[in-house]
Image (cartoon, rainbow, N blue to C red):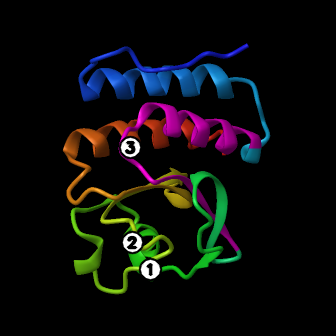
Amino acid sequence: MFDFAPAPDAAKPAIYAQLCEAAEAITAGESDAVANMANVAALLGEFVTDCNWAGFYRMVDGGLVLGPFCGRPACIRIPVGRGVCGAAVAEARSQLVEDVHAFPGHIACDARSRSELVVPVLRDGAVVAVIDLDSPTPARFDAEDQAGIEALAALLSDRI
């Protein structure tokens, strides 16, 4: 039985270190990418507060396709270059957006979302997926969140 949860009142860097430790433990030795993404999406829901959506989009046939997530129903397909997720793929770099309504071409899957963090998962220099976090709070995510999710993406690069 797994019982992963962040330590109460831990600082963000410690929370993200604990998240990566939990992701390491739960994905170690498992070769099924979807199972690993599903478990990590559940961990994101437990470890990252003030999110209304947390999960994955996978690269399939040259575009992003919805993967495992926690939250309300979402857009199924996102073209590369469109929205925050598509920009993360096109630029192969994280997108930290304080106000999604000011982001050109933002895709509003959930009208409650106000800020977003999208981190590409890279394998051999190519984007294989993105980790997407949405929050109803403007400017919810910062450089510590970005660094923590980038560490998670690096851990998962050969597991999804």
- The label nearer to you, 1 versus 2, is 1
Residue carrying label 3: 150
- The label nearer to you, 3 versus 1, is 1
Q: Give SS at disc 1.
A: loop
In 3D space, how far apart are the residues under numbered discs 1 and 2 (Cα atoms)? 8 Å
Viewer-proximal residue among 145 and 31 = 145
Q: Are marks 1 and 2 in contact (CB under 8 Å)?
A: yes
Q: Give SS at disc 3.
A: helix
Residue carrying label 2: 84
**Residue visible at 55% across and 82% down?**
79
N-terminal of the pair, mark 1 or mark 2, is: 2
Q: Give SS at disc 2.
A: helix
Viewer-proximal residue among 63 and 44 = 44
- Quadrant of the drawing holding the N terminus: top right
Question: In the rendering, which numbered label is found on residue 107?
Answer: 1
> Label 2 amino acid?
Val
Residue 144 position, x and y percent, is 23, 38
> Label 3 amino acid?
Glu
Magenta highlight range: 35-60
**Crowd rating for badge 2 (residues with CA inside 10 Å; few <14, some 14–19, many 20+):** many
**Residue visible at 66% across and 58% down?**
67
**Crowd rating for badge 3 (residues with CA inside 10 Å; few <14, some 14–19, many 20+):** many
In 3D space, how far apart are the residues under numbered discs 3 and 1 (Cα atoms)? 22 Å
State left or right for residue 142 relative to residue 69.
left
